[in-house]
Amino acid sequence: MKPERQRLLDLVIDLILRVGVLDLSMSAISREIGSNNRMLLYYFGSREKLLDEACVRAFVRFPRLETMFARLRGEGDLNERLYAAWDDLAAPENRPYLVLFFQRFGAAMGDPERWRNDLHPSTHRWAEDLAEIFVAEGADDRSAALWGTHLLAVWRGMQFALLADAEPASLRESYRVGVDALTEALLQP
């Protein structure tokens, strides 16, 4: 049997992946997971701390996202690894996580001081991780950093388009054209 705190956290993760975090009061959370406010406050301290932990922990439920950079750092053709990264990001099973990510991102825009360091590491590290991969492929540091930032922005825009019901096959094809142009510019002699 799982300890009670973990059991409650798992139920909250299930809830936020199903309905999101917007407008979830502590009472609504308690009611939906079959607990009570006092129990949740005892284990988590506040609604914000509970939702913050649940959002961060939700990420591990999406192994294709969690291990995407390990695959990007792997062997083989850079274009093929970048194509696979979009397939990982756009996988239908990741949709609940993407909705959650953009909800938290929207909250961060409304209260940047509170959320500055609390958003998922993908908002802080992914561009740097991409730059490291590009340097390992032979790009200079400045170009790698610029293209890493660019590719992350492309991913975010395409993820948003995916959630807005853009045609997945069209997005995939567009992404591949962009990756081909990126790697040609990045790795030119």
Image (cartoon, rainbow, N blue to C red):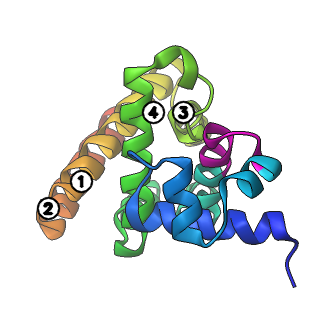
Q: Residue at x 34, y 45 (%)?
A: 155
Q: Main secondary structure of the magenta part?
A: helix
- Ranked by sequence position, the earlier of labels 3 and 4 is 3
**Whether label 1 touches label 2, CB < 8 Å:** no
**Whether label 1 touches label 4, CB < 8 Å:** no
Residue 170 is left or right of residue 39, and the answer is left
Q: State which quadrant residue 4 falls in.
A: bottom right
Which quadrant of the figure contains the C terminus?
Answer: top left
Q: Amino acid at mark 2?
A: Asp
Q: Residues within 10 Å of mark 2 (few under 14, many from 20)?
A: few
**Whether label 3 touches label 1, CB < 8 Å:** no
Any magenta on residue 50? yes
- Ranked by sequence position, the earlier of labels 1 and 2 is 2
The front one of 105 and 110 is 110
Compute the Cα span from label 4 to label 2.
Answer: 26 Å
- Would you say residue 20 is visible in this rendering? yes
Compute the Cα span from label 1 to label 2.
Answer: 16 Å
The front one of 163 and 104 is 104
Dot label at residue 131:
3
**Whether label 3 touches label 4, CB < 8 Å:** yes
Assign a secondary structure to mark 3: helix
The mark closer to the camera, 2 or 3, is 2
- Ranked by sequence position, the earlier of labels 1 and 4 is 4
Compute the Cα span from label 2 to label 3.
Answer: 30 Å
- Ranked by sequence position, the earlier of labels 3 and 1 is 3
- Ranked by sequence position, the earlier of labels 4 and 2 is 4
The front one of 149 and 167 is 167
Which quadrant of the figure contains the N terminus?
Answer: bottom right
Dot label at residue 148:
4
Dot label at residue 165:
2
- Ranked by sequence position, the earlier of labels 2 and 3 is 3
